[in-house]
Image: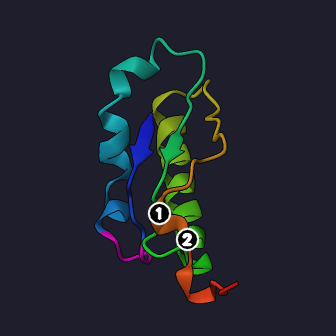
Amino acid sequence: MQLSDIHIADSNDVVFARPKEIVAAIRSLLYEASAAIVLVTGDVAFSGEESQYLSAIDLLDALKKAISRRADSLGPTLPPRNSGNHDCDFSVATSN
């Protein structure tokens, strides 16, 4: 499963109410799969703040639980993500 541009600002974002629906979209594939991979490709955070990544971890944990409920034998793998421009915290940037 690929997620992109989720732009998490905090744990009140609408995406946090949808892990079951997200997994339902790939449910038919889970029965034939030997592994489940969640690929997060860029713009995970809204503005690159640490708290936004902590919220993203909570979302990924919820997705892992939902996937595990759908396919007991699959242990989701979460590979490294690719950064997007929103994943940079420009408030800590320094000028050189």
Q: Nearer the viewer, residue 58 or 92?
A: 92
| Residue drawn at (65%, 87%) of the image | 95
Identify residue for label 1: 85
Please state the horizontal and vertical placement of residue 74, each as a whole percent of the image.
Answer: 60, 26
Give amino acid for label 2.
Cys
- Relative to 70, say whether 5 is above or below: below
> Bounds of the magenta span?
9-13
| Residue drawn at (48%, 52%) of the image | 42
Tell me the crowding category of disc 2: few under 14, some 14 to 19, or many 20 or more residues within 10 angstroms, Cα based: some
Q: Nearer the viewer, residue 18 or 73?
A: 18
Q: Nearer the viewer, residue 77 or 7?
A: 7
| Residue drawn at (59%, 15%) of the image | 34
Q: Residue 1's quadrant in the figure?
A: top left
Q: Which mark is residue 88?
A: 2
- Count the labels in the image: 2
Please state the horizontal and vertical placement of residue 63, each as a whole percent of the image.
Answer: 48, 48
Please tell me whether residue 10 belongs to the stretch shown in magenta.
yes
- Relative to 87, say whether 82 is above or below: above
Please tell me whether residue 40 belongs to the stretch shown in magenta.
no
Label 2's element? Answer: loop
Q: Residue 30's quadrant in the figure?
A: top left
User: Does residue 8 appear to the left or right of 89 in the view shown?
Assistant: left
Please state the horizontal and vertical placement of residue 31, each as a whole percent of the image.
Answer: 45, 16
Please state the horizontal and vertical placement of residue 2, each as a whole percent of the image.
Answer: 44, 37
Tell me whether circle 2 and circle 1 mark residues in contact (CB < 8 Å): yes
Tell me the crowding category of disc 1: few under 14, some 14 to 19, or many 20 or more residues within 10 angstroms, Cα based: some
Give amino acid for label 1.
Asn
> Magenta region's main secondary structure?
loop
